[in-house]
Image (spheres, rainbow, N blue to C red):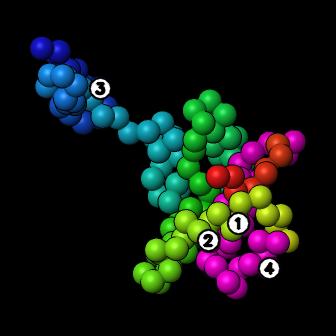
Amino acid sequence: MVQLDPAEPGKQALLSSLLKSYRSLPGRVKTPNLQQSMGLEKLFSDRSFNEQELLEVRTHLINHGFTICPGGTSLVQLLNNIPKEQLTHMGADFRSCVGLSEASLKALEAATPVATMVLQSVERLKRVLPPEAVILGALE
C-alpha cells in the first residue's frame, strides 16, 4: 500500500490494468502544469496570449511533443458545427487536404470544413512555434 500525502495537489485515483493479471496502484492525478501556471480560463479562451505565455506554450510543445492550442475553442466550434451527414466522410476530406499549400486550402474552404480546420490549425501553430520553424501542413 502506498501512503499518499494529502498536502500534495491533485486527486487520489486508483489506476488499474489487466495484463495477464489484474493490478491496481493508488496514485494521484495532478492538474497539468500549463493549467496550473496559466489558468483553465486562459487556456480555453480565444484571447491572444502574451509573449511570456506563448514562450511557455512553445516550451511545453518542444519538451513534451504536444501543447494546448491558442484559440482552440473556435476549432472545437468548427468541428461541432459540421453537419452529422458530413462527419462520415471527414477522413476522405482530410486526406484531400494533405500536402496542400495554404492557397490551395483556401480554395477548398467552401467545399469542405476540414480545409478551414487545417488552415486555422496551421495559423495557431505559427503563433506557437519559433519563427524559424517550417510548417508543412496536414500530414497523414
Q: Depth-wise, is mark 3 or mark 4 nearer the camera?
A: 4
Q: Depth-wise, is mark 2 or mark 3 nearer the camera?
A: 2
Vertical arrangement, residue 99 with respect to residue 117, above or below: above
Q: CA distance from mark 1 to mark 4?
A: 11 Å
> Do the CB atoms of the residues marked 1 and 2 lie less than 8 Å apart?
yes
Task: Quickly name the residue at label 2.
Answer: 93
Q: CA distance from mark 3 to mark 4?
A: 52 Å
The three-letter code of the residue at mark 2 reads Asp
Which SS class for mark 1? Answer: helix
> Do the CB atoms of the residues marked 1 and 4 lie less than 8 Å apart?
no
Observer-nearest residue: 53 or 14? 14
Q: Residue at x 50, y 60 (%)?
A: 44
Q: Residue at x 75, y 45 (%)?
A: 129
The three-letter code of the residue at mark 1 reads Cys
Which SS class for mark 3? Answer: loop
Dot 2 or dot 3, earlier in sequence = 3
> Do the CB atoms of the residues marked 2 and 3 lie less than 8 Å apart?
no
Which SS class for mark 2? Answer: helix
> Do the CB atoms of the residues marked 3 and 4 lie less than 8 Å apart?
no
Query: Could you say where residue 102 lies in the image, as x and y percent from the top left?
Result: 82, 66
Task: Quickly name the residue at label 1.
Answer: 97
Q: Which residues are magenta?
A: 104-132
Dot 3 or dot 1, earlier in sequence = 3
Query: Could you say where residue 137 lies in the image, as x and y percent from the top left?
Result: 75, 56
Task: Quickly name the residue at label 3.
Answer: 8
Query: Could you say where residue 120 lies in the image, as x and y percent from the top left?
Result: 68, 66
* Residue 7 shown left or right of residue 73 in the figure: left
Vertical arrangement, residue 28 with respect to residue 58, above or below: above
Query: Could you say where residue 15 lies in the image, as x and y percent from the top left?
Result: 22, 30
